[in-house]
Image: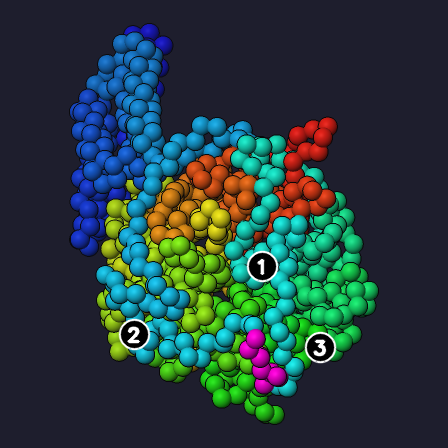
Amino acid sequence: MDDTHRARRGFGFWSAMVIGAIIAIFGVPIFAGGIWLAALGGSWYYVLAGLGLLVTAVFLFRRSMLAVWVYLATFAGTVAWALWEAGFDGWAQVPRLVAPTVVLVLVLATIPALRGRLARPVGAATAAIAGGLALAGSLTVLTLSQNDIAVAQDAPALDEAAPVEETEQPVTDVLPDQPGQVPAGEVPAVEPDAAGPADDAASTAPEPAGDEPTPATTPTGIEARSPLAMMEVGENWPAYGGTYYGTRYSPLDQITPDNVGELTRVWEYNSGDMPEGEGAEAASYSPENTPLKIGDDLYHCTPMGIMIAIDAATGLEEWRYDPDVSTDAIPYGATCRGGAYFEVPDAEPDTMCATRILWGTLDARLLAVDARTGQPCPDFGMAGEVYLEEGIGDTVPGWYSVTSPPTIVRGIAVMGAQVNDGQAEDAPSGVVRGYDAVTGELAWAWDLENPDSRTAPAEGETYSRGTPNMWTIAAADEELGLVYLPLGNSAVDYYGSNRSELENEYATSIVAVDVTTGDDVWHFQTVYNDVWDYDLGSQPALVDFPSGEDTVPAIIVSSKQGDIYILDRATGEPLFAPEEREVPQGGVEPDYLSPTQPFSTYHTLAFEPLEERDMWGMTPLDQLWCRIQFRQAHYEGMYTPPTSDQRWIQYPGYNGGQDWGSLAVDEERGIMIANYNNMPNHNRLIPREEADEMGARAIFEPEWERGAEGPGPQLGSPYAIAVNAGWRQWTGLLCSEPPYGGIRAIDLETGETLWDQPFGSARKNGPWGIPSMLPIDIGTPNNGGPVVTAGGLIFIAATTDDLIRAIDIETGETVWQDTLPGGGQTTPIVYDVAGRQFLVIAPGGHHFMETPVSDAVIAWALPETGEAVEGATGN
């Protein structure tokens, strides 16, 4: 035997040993974990697969060809099991088939070394590897070719998108003959006096504006105003949701699916408001800002509340007003979703603050500045400021903040506030207040536990503490004089036995408040006795809902659990009667939970309940671990009760369904657009003694540290709360399989799904935060809303891949995209300057979504005559 032959034989021997060792290393935990899973009532596959791996390793150590045959049998069984469990869903097959296929290649590569058969080793090994790769490629093609996930193209325009199958949704098409009536149908209407959605409010609803007089004064003596003209969308984008109707629709049609590929960046502005240092404050930016466009100007609010006027055509800064907010005031995140524009009635156009911008700050101030100069309005509050902590009582920086813009109705600026979640039952009040937009005087206060008072509390007293707050954006009907408040939960989200009757009645409700009196006219509750943090985060949308040959003035309410409700906006009566269904009981509060919950019969974004087979990972090992966690957890479907002796699965999680990004509605086409999240949470209530030992501290305690890991203390209740948002595993990936987010078109009249597809690519996502750069639409978590236009386009960013997209509203096809310098967790706007349509977004990034922070505001437009097309990369 020559030296070359001897060397090859030695190499073959050691390669078989090494491959055998690798297979044994993976085989042991798969076999042991498989026994654990089977003992919990789960799949037996891992026991058999682990056994097959261990036997394969033994025969490799013995240099026996039986290793190949044993593994081939194991692999064949794996393929059969994978197809039985997940069919041809490509993403579902990643943990089931990718790693086993790699092992197959390695095993086949050992054939020349087994039993000392080393003739023509190079050729034999090459053939073996080629065969394995061919099989792996075939499996990959087989699974991915059947997958309904579209592949993102490199070119800006996607000319050959796969057709999107229509998703059927159960719809009960029962519309009333007259507004405010709930028709008889297959689903019973909810009784108004039940512990649920709506009050019998028809008799107390305000009459539409007209010949009827309005009240002379507000509860605090401010003269009430008649309905004011509402600025239209088109040339302008005058409010956060386009208008206070919140439909995010523009009548502009210059940019269409046919020419959107020609969009070019025309300017980029940088505010300079970026986090500094390396502390927790630096890691907590989440701007979520949607600018306003009025006349020639954009009004952009930075994360720390700096209001900046920018020339809408050129991107040049015109003025800025810095309220000098301390970073100590940052609550959950540094956020300013936007401001509000107001024209003082009958004011001389050239007078100071005849037109003004109002917004709130993280340190709880309401500010008003002149829209032309940025100078504080001297007639508003104290030198342009109103201090919102008055009457709130005990608080500390970061506990009580304003992150959303005011909603101005009949000259009353309606203000809610964010109360930092999970700290204590004795939290600052969730009071919602109305202020005169001219003077800053308090017009009324809607304080849940003080229904007989609409004024400020008496000296030495405070607004009722711990009550549900409105941290998100309200909608409003100027003619009806109603403002629609999407309420959150009580101060402790995951325990309710200590709540008052009024808290139980109003939490997680949409509440219509008369803007002249501060009285609630009706309310509709979407969750009874909410212990899941399912607060209403979306701004409602006001539409003329089609009803035969007529329309009904309606309000669309979307929820975190995925249900979408259509209500008469004057009375709160459902146009599609909700269905009361029994839900799981038990947990730590069996006497508190509601035995039923309302479910929408119009449309839901919710998916089927999770099963063990829905668990996911990069490899069989992490998928196995997620399966074990699934079997260990308490889970009975939606509204699974919270538990303390074991973790429970909340699906969808508190960032599921729709959050603050909200819906968009094209009433002309009769299409509603909803982007949504599809992720579970993995939670546990922690008994107070255990929480104390863990060091759980509230924001007002000396030991509290911003950004510290650990449970929410929920002081005043028997339990702290540990939430694994998204149910992430040690790799940083989620335990449930993709897609984690989608976008859907819904027929406005019937609630039927027109198209539905995963939303967001894997290009900036991967294990341990390493970008995979895969241009495949996996469906990522997304926060931020869509804008729809008369040109037939949806403009939206929102996803964690740092892209902005244009989607054909009729087909769901992505027809253009561009790369952003930061995360696009915000909503774009569309406006016109001198006949040229602009698309603008402020992609500030988001700490919770783990996207890069940016201080940019970016504008796109079609090229003017002779202008070169550049800027849209399609990457």
Q: Is residue 694 or residue 223 the one in the foreground?
A: 223
Task: Give me the disc on residue 439.
Answer: 3
Provide residue 127's location: percent of width, then percent of height: 30, 14
Quarter the N terminus occupies: top left
Residue 870: x %, y % from top left: 66, 31
- The segment highlighted magenta reads 211-219
Quadrant location of the C terminus?
A: top right
The numbered mark, 1 or 2, whose residue comes first in the sequence reads 2
In the figure, 711 relative to 545: above or below? Answer: below
Q: Amino acid at mark 3?
A: Thr
- The residue lying at 38 percent from left, 42 percent from top is 755
Precedes in sequence: disc 3 or disc 2: 2
Q: Is 387 left, or right, of 807 in this rendering?
A: right
Q: Reply above or below: 337 against 501.
A: above
Q: Residue at x 54, y 51 (%)?
A: 249
Residue 464 falls inside the magenta stretch: no
User: What's the distance in space between the residues labelled 1 and 3, CA to CA?
Assistant: 23 Å
Measured as percent of width and height from the top left, residue 16 is found at: 29, 25
Q: Which residue is mark 2?
A: 191
SS for tag 3?
A: loop
Dot 3, how many residues are within 10 Å of its Cα: few (below 14), some (14-19), or many (20+)?
A: some
The coloring applied to the image is rainbow
- Residue hosting label 1: 243
Q: Is residue 38 left or right of residue 216?
A: left
Alpha carbons under labels 1 and 2: distance apart: 33 Å
Helix, strand or loop: magenta stretch:
loop
- Residues 236 and 681: in front is 236
Looking at this view, name the residue that lies furthest to the top. 2
